[in-house]
Amino acid sequence: MKEFKKYYYLPAPPEDVFNALTNPVTLQLWTGEPAEMSTEPGSEFSLWDGSIAGRNISFEKDKSIVQQWYFGDQEEESIVKIILHEKGTGTSVELSHTNIPDEEFDDFVDGWNASYFGALREFYNE
């Protein structure tokens, strides 16, 4: 199992980034795919038409998101923590993703960089 940590910069305030990551309508706008999401702890979520699925653990409005991502029968929970820091007129996003299966690590790094935060950065730059 591997862990991935990285900072991203988005040209939008933390409240907009939080909304983009938690509101199903806004998620669909920047991903181009249907999204199921709620800010209710314990609720299930699904992104990219089910390619990413899991359970929401906790939220601190406009500041942080903690989720468990599902990988089949994996014994150790794969936890994603996204912490939003105001930086100038934008947001510094601190990402931590634990217990990524070794064989899927490179795909997940590419996904975080291009499909997830890359797409979100493009959404704000349009």
Image (tube, rainbow, N blue to C red):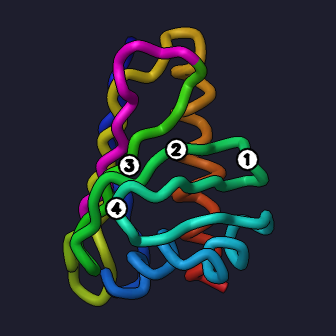
N-term mark: 3 or 1: 1
Q: Kindly report the distance in space between the C-alpha atoms of the residues bearing marks 3 and 1.
A: 15 Å
Q: Which quadrant: the C terminus?
A: bottom right
Q: Which residues are magenta?
A: 73-84
Q: Label 4 near label 3: C-beta < 8 Å? A: no
Q: Label 3 near label 2: C-beta < 8 Å? A: yes
Q: Could you say which disc has been placed on residue 90 in the image?
A: none
Q: Kindly report the distance in space between the C-alpha atoms of the residues bearing marks 4 and 2.
A: 12 Å
Q: Residues within 10 Å of mark 4 (few under 14, many from 20)?
A: some
Label 3, on which residue? 67
Q: Secondary structure at mark 1?
A: helix
Q: Kindly report the distance in space between the C-alpha atoms of the residues bearing marks 1 and 4.
A: 19 Å
Q: Residue 49, position in %: x, y?
A: 78, 53
> 13 and 42: which one is in front?
42
Q: How many marks?
A: 4
For residue 95: magenta? Answer: no
Q: Residue 21, position in %: x, y?
A: 48, 69
| Circle nearer the viewer, 4 or 2 | 4
Q: Label 1 near label 2: C-beta < 8 Å? A: no
Residue type marked 4: Pro
Label 4, on which residue? 41
Label 2, on which residue? 54
